[in-house]
Image (cartoon, rainbow, N blue to C red):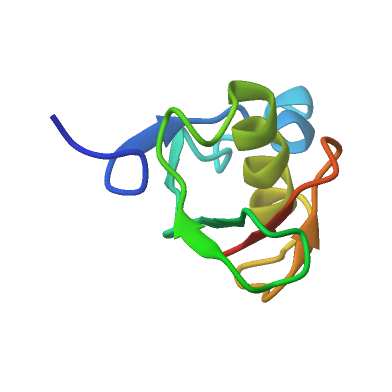
Amino acid sequence: MPTLTQRAVPVQAHRLAAQGDARAPKSVTIPPIQVDRSGVGHCWVDADATKLPKNIEIEIECEILDGGVAHTDDYVASNGLHYRW
């Protein structure tokens, strides 16, 4: 079974899809994501399905697709944890 960072995740590109644009992507491959367990950047671990809640996975997908953030060294998600990809 592929890991979270290896699988293609279905994503709805809301802006393009709402406009009926045929270019709306059907899926995106999530880059490798890490979560900082220390809260201060000292304990980065690979995020898997148990360490990355679905709502945070969607939040990161939106940052990548809608926000254009293809890479970041520190992203504070709505749950207060730090992520990087």
Residue 70 visible in the displayed image:
yes
- In the image, residue 37 sits, relative to residue 62, either above or below, namely below
- In the displayed structure image, the side of residue 14 where residue 23 appears, left or right: left
* Residue 63 point in image, percent of width and height: 74, 51
Residue at horizontal 45%, vertical 28%?
50
In the rendered image, the vertical position of residue 61 relative to residue 40, given as above or below: above
Q: Residue at x 86, y 38 (%)?
A: 78
- What residue do we see at 63% from left, 53% from top? 37
- Front-most of 1 and 47? 47
Placement of the C terminus among the 4 image quadrants: bottom right
Farthest residue to the left: give it.
1
- On the image, which quarter does residue 9 sit in? top left
Q: Nearer the viewer, residue 44 or 5?
A: 44
Position of the N terminus by quadrant: top left
How many numbered marks are there? 0
**Residue 21 showing in the rendered view:** no
x and y, in percent, of residue 70 in the image: 61, 68
Task: Estimate the x, y position of residue 66 in percent, counting from the top left.
Answer: 75, 49
- Quick one: 43 or 53, which is closer to the camera? 43
From this view, report whether residue 79 is shown above or below residue 71: above
Horizontal and vertical percent for residue 44? 54, 65
Residue at 45% over, 50% down: 30
Which one is in front, 13 or 59?
59
Quick check: 28 above or below 45?
A: above
In the figure, is residue 50 to the left or right of 70? Answer: left
Q: Quadrant of residue 60?
A: top right
